[in-house]
Amino acid sequence: MPAPKLIVTVCTANICRSPMAEALLRHALQAEAEPLRSCQVVSAGVAARKGERISPNSVEALAKVSLRASDHRSQPLTADLASQADLILCMTESHRDVIAISFDSPPQNVFLWREFMPAPADREIGDPYGGSLKEYEACRDEMVDAIPSLLAYLRGR
């Protein structure tokens, strides 16, 4: 299977988890060899409104690891975007379930962000929305912990 050209990270409203995942994965891919380095990474939400700003705590959690995402604006996961994606990475099983029932032709390339981690790792990343900065940092760290296994999966495609 060829390396993906478009990876979409997905959460609920596309203002907390998926924008952080987008920034983290984009950064990690910059250290990879081609063709992974050239992958485009975007984020979307299964219940997102278009144009919402990223949560301030997501911006701050990313800034603490020297990543910038303050320009991010939310977008819904549309059938068009889903059909263009080579890989869709969700935060929870409920996101995967919503995707499976939302489109006439559900995509088959939908995985959890932490799905490739060895057991007994928790596969889901909880929503920090409305929580403290520490909760957002913990969410970010759960994503960071999964990046090596996610990159290994991508290299093996």
Image: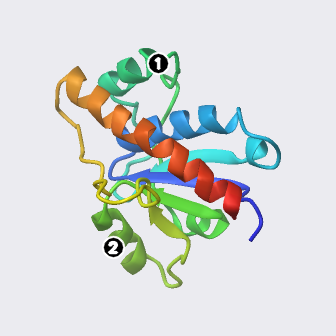
Instruction: Give the vertical position of 106 relative to 120 (above or below).
Output: below
Q: Residue at x 31, y 54 (%)?
A: 121
- Which quadrant holds the C terminus? bottom right
Give the residue pinned by disc 1: 65
Q: Can residue 107 be seen in the rendering of this structure?
A: yes
The image shows residue 13, relative to residue 154, as above or below, that is above
Task: Give the mark nearest the N terminus, 2 or 1.
Answer: 1
Which residue lies under the disc numbered 2? 97
Q: Nearer the viewer, residue 59 or 25?
A: 25
Amino acid type, label 2: Asp
Q: Position of residue 15 (x, y in %)?
A: 37, 38
Which residue is outermost to the front?
119
Q: Position of residue 138 (x, y in %)?
A: 27, 31
- The residue type indicated by label 1 comes to Val
Q: Secondary structure at mark 2?
A: helix
Q: Position of residue 18 (x, y in %)?
A: 43, 44
Give the quarter of the image for residue 96. Answer: bottom left
How packed mark 2 is, by other alpha carbons closer than 10 Å (few <14, some 14-19, many 20 or more), is: few
Residue drawn at x 29%, y 58% as measured from the top left? 120
Residue neighbourhood size for the residue with mark 1, other residues' Cα within 10 Å, grouped as few (<14), some (14–19), many (≥20): few
Relative to 58, 156 lies left or right? right
Q: Residue at (60%, 49%) from the top-left corner?
A: 151
Report, in whole angstroms, how far the alpha carbon at label 2 lies from the one at label 1.
31 Å
